[in-house]
Every structure is written in C-alpha cells, then in structure tokens.
Image (cartoon, coloured by chain):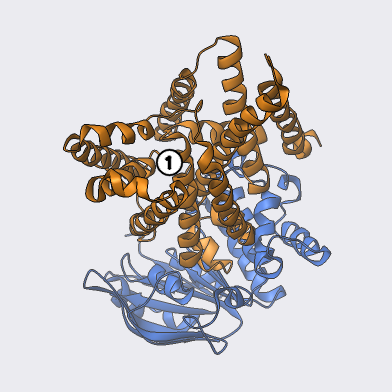
Amino acid sequence: MLQRNRPAIVLIILGLMAVSSIVAFMTLGVRGNWGFVLEYRGRKVLGLCLVAYSIAVSTVLFQTVTGNRILTPSIMGFDALFILIRTTIAFFFGFGFLVQLPLQAQFAAEVIVMTGFAALLFNWLFLRGQRSLHLMVLVGIVFGVLFRNLSGFMQRMMDPVEFQSLQDSFFARFGQIDPALLGISCVIITVASIVAWRISHSFDVLILGRSQAISLGVPYRRRVAVILGIIAVLVSVSTALVGPVTFFGLLVVSLAHVLCGDGRHRHILPASVLLGIICLVGGQTVLERVFAFNTALSIIIEFLGGLIFIILLIRGAAR
Amino acid sequence: MIVIENLSKKYADFPCVDNVSLTIAGGGVTSIIGPNGAGKSTLLSLIARLLDFDRGSVSVDGLDVTKTKSDVLAQRLSILRQDNHIASRLTVRDLVSFGRYPYSRGRLTDHDHAKVEEAIGFLHLDDLAERFLDELSGGQRQRAYIAMVLCQDTDYVLLDEPLNNLDMKHARNMMQLIRRAADELGKTIVLVMHDINFASWYSDHIVAMREGRVAHAGACHDIMQPEVLSSVYDMEIEVQEIAGKRISLFYA
C-alpha cells in the first residue's frame, strides 16, 4: 500500500518544501519597505519558477521522446544553439538593430527562429530510425562545441561594445533575471503548456517506444514533432532568462525518478518541476541570505548535475 | 482478413520485401518462417504500419493501413516486437493498462479495468501485477507484454518472434497461450517464427519466405514437407510424423 501511495506522498512533501523555499526567499532578511521588497523579490521568484518549470518539463519530455534517461536538451547542445542564434542576429544585423526592437519582440523572434532550427535538427536526429545512445551523446557534444565555437568566432569579429552587451547572456545567472522578459515568458510558457496538456495522454504511451506507441494508435511522427517543438520553445525561454545550464534538468529529473519510484508522467512531471523550484529558489535563498554569495548557485548545480550525468553514463554502459 | 498486394520495401536499394501478395484469413494462428534476412519481420512491421512501404497495399478487414487513422487501426490490429526497452519504471498492471489506450486515452473506465484484470488473469500474472518490469525475469516480462497486447483486444495480433530468449518450458507455455488466445478469444494471430517445429505444432497456416518473397504459403501440413522446407532453407531437411504432427529433423 505504501508503495502504491509513494508518489503522492513524495509530491506532497516536495510541494511543501517548494512553498517553504518560496516563503523563505520572500521574507528572510527583509529590511525597509515590505511592499517594495516583496514586489522585487516576487519577480525574482517568478523568474526562477519559470526557469525551473521550463527546464524540468522540457527535460522530461525530451527523455520521453528519445526513450532514454541520460540525454537532455542542453546535453544535446540545444542551449548552445540559442546562443548561436542570438549571436548571429547581433552579428549580421548589428546591435543597433537589436536595440531598436522592443525587448519582447526580440525575444519572440529569437524563440521562433530557435524553435524552427531545433525542430529541423531534432526531427532529423530522432525521427530517422533508432540510434545508439552513445552516438547521440557524442553528436550532442560535437554540436555543442560547434555551436559555441561558431558563436565565439562571430563574437571575436564583433564590435567590442556590441560584444559586451551580448556577453551578459552567455553565463547562467539565477540572481539577475531581466524583469522585462517575465511577462512574455509567462505567455509563451502558458501557450506551450496548453499544447502539451492537450496531448499529455500520450506521454506515458511514448515511454513504450516507437513500435508500441504506433501499435497503440499514437500518430507517432506528428506527435513527436509537436513535442520537440514544445521542448524547443521551453528551452529558448529558460536560456533567454538565465543563460545556458547544462546539467540542471538532468539533476532534477533523475532525482524525481528516484523519489517517485515509478515513471508515469503524472508523477514525474510535477515532481521534477517542484524539485527544480526547490533547487533554484531554495538554493538561491541559502546562498544569498546565509552565505551572501550571488553567482555560485549555477556552479553548484552544474557540479551536482554533472556528477549524476557521469554516474548514469557509467551505470548505463554497465547494463 | 489481411490482404497484402504487390508489397515492396527497399533498404538502401536492397529489396527487403519484394512484391509480396498474400492473404491471411481471419481466425487461427499463422506462422511466417524462413531463413535470416528473408524479410519476415519487415513484412510484419509493414502490415502494422511501423514502416512505410515503397509500393503496394495492405488492408486489414478492408481498412487500408496507410490511410486509416492510427487510433482506429489500433482497435483492430496490434503488434508486439522484440526490441522492447523502457527507460522508466512501470508495474505490470501499468503496462497492461496501456492496452486500453486506444479506447480510453489513459482515463480508464470500469470496463477498461475489467479488461485489464481479465488479461492479467489470462496470462496468470495476478501475483506479479504490482511488481515493476525491471524486477521480472525475461519470460515473465514477455508475458506482461503479451497481456498488454491482449488487453488491447484487437481481432488481429502480430507477434514478432515471441519465443525469442525463452527457454523450452516458457516457449511451450507461450505457444499454448497463443493457441488459447486464438481458440478461446477468437483472435487472428500472425507470428514470425524461427523454430519451425514449434510453428508446425501450434499453427494452422504457415507462410514460408525467402529473399523477400513468399516462397510457399498454405496449411501447416502442406508446408511441412521435406522438399518445400529444403528449398526454403537451402539445406537438407527431413520431416517425420510424430503424434499426428509433422516434425522436421535438420540437426545432422
């Protein structure tokens, strides 16, 4: 009986932890005007929650359609692609072009371009038959390096002033999320989530693999293409908000699998999102309020996530 | 009735299934046999729309598999392949419940629950229903998958090498079960088989394939003939009648 209720118990505990980390972040060490502080911190929390949600959901869905537990969009070079797109736009149209547009329009344009490219790339990779996991990891690393180096190449030829304004977006920074992007991020994430919700009944079936999913009547090619599109949108949003984070998604989704003990999406999706919120908001609270650090959270998360990646790779290879 | 007309599929210019025309009547067990690379599994995948074909047509009870909506077809025809690998943890009952997906889209009704329990009972999986798939032996896992396919409750069930990796006892149990599904549940079952003696013992019809073509097709008795089998497998094969069944001897 305990086994059967375990995911529900886990979700309740994670929910309570997530709420308490949000409360702690909002209220600890407040000095001065409460209204101002709550609004200021509220924006930060909202940003962190959006990032946690995007990364967790995109990672879970990515692992579902690729049928593995090791690959994530960022390991496959997805966020490096976003940086490449941003750099390319700045390189060819100049930074002047970028500042002329309102921030939201820029962001929307980048998300659209990114989604298009990512859809092409991943349809090519994942809809053309089965490929070995190790080949995919290798492809991801090669793509990541390629995208990063292309971006680096263009950045070197750029005007130093333009480069400086771009450079900000290349480091994960959970502490400073641009509040101007929060509104449009919310809208984009909501739209992507509604699309995902409408097809969510087929997520579990996709775990069974391509053959079994088709046998059970899922229009596989179309469905996977849509899901890869949703993933591309979510990754674009999170990368635009905080920059690239390689192993965060892997960290929370692997933890969610361990804690829930069963792999159904109705448990794994919320558990991953809650773990993401606990890691980011809780982690940020501890670092900002207790240790008075600001930028170290991404390093810690990447360190832990990287460890899990190596453990999973070794265990996967041994199996 | 499954009707296949002029079906062709090429892999990199190599004709894997070459102009196959075949009719599989409704009811009973039909085994597809033949040497490695004869196109048996490919043919099964083509029938079940897992692969796109280059030419020809396949229809199941008059429904063209390329034009019929996938979820409609999923209530008529199911396939189970052997390369099943699940990256997540699922219990046997979870897995079997997926068989109801074509009907209920994951929201199981009382009728669906009854069907799930029925399939679990049919496969004698009651004691294992709450166990996770990764805790089961190969034979038990295979039974769980078969339960899912039976739970899908389709008239046509295609099984790709259902005896793969099973020992003698489990292989026999599996074939008895397939026979029961055909006789008691009235299903039409199409198997890809490597062991021709198992095929002979349990099937009504046999389709022998060679080099992407159907070499012979007919009643079990007509295919289990020395000259027919020898030409299909390109080796000397003796056939003896034992207990009313035709058994091939090819070991020496």
**Which chain letter matches label 1?**
A
Does the rendering let one see residue B79?
no
Q: Quadrant of the C terminus of chain A?
A: top left
Chain rendered blue: B
B115 sits to left or right of B249: right
The x, y position of residue B140, in whole percent, is 62, 49
B224 sits to left or right of B69: left
Q: Residue at x 45, y 72 (%)?
A: B44
Q: Which of A180/A223 is in front?
A: A180
Which element type, helix, strand or loop, lies under badge 1?
loop
Vertical placement of residue B160 versus A168, above or below? below
In the rendered structure, which amino acid carries the disc numbered 1?
A: Leu
User: Is the residue marked by circle 1 packed among few (<14), some (14-19), or many (20+) residues within 10 Å?
Assistant: many
The x, y position of residue A315, in whole percent, is 45, 30
Chain rendered orange: A
Name the residue furthest top. Answer: A291
Q: Which of B21/A86 is in front?
A: A86
Residue at which label 1 appears:
A71
The x, y position of residue B136, in whole percent, is 61, 42
The x, y position of residue A249, in whole percent, is 50, 36
Residue A37 occupies which quadrant of the picture?
Answer: top right
Q: Which of B165/B148 is in front?
A: B148
Q: Quadrant of the N terminus of chain A?
A: top right
Vertical placement of residue B241 versus A275, above or below? below
A160 sits to left or right of A189: left
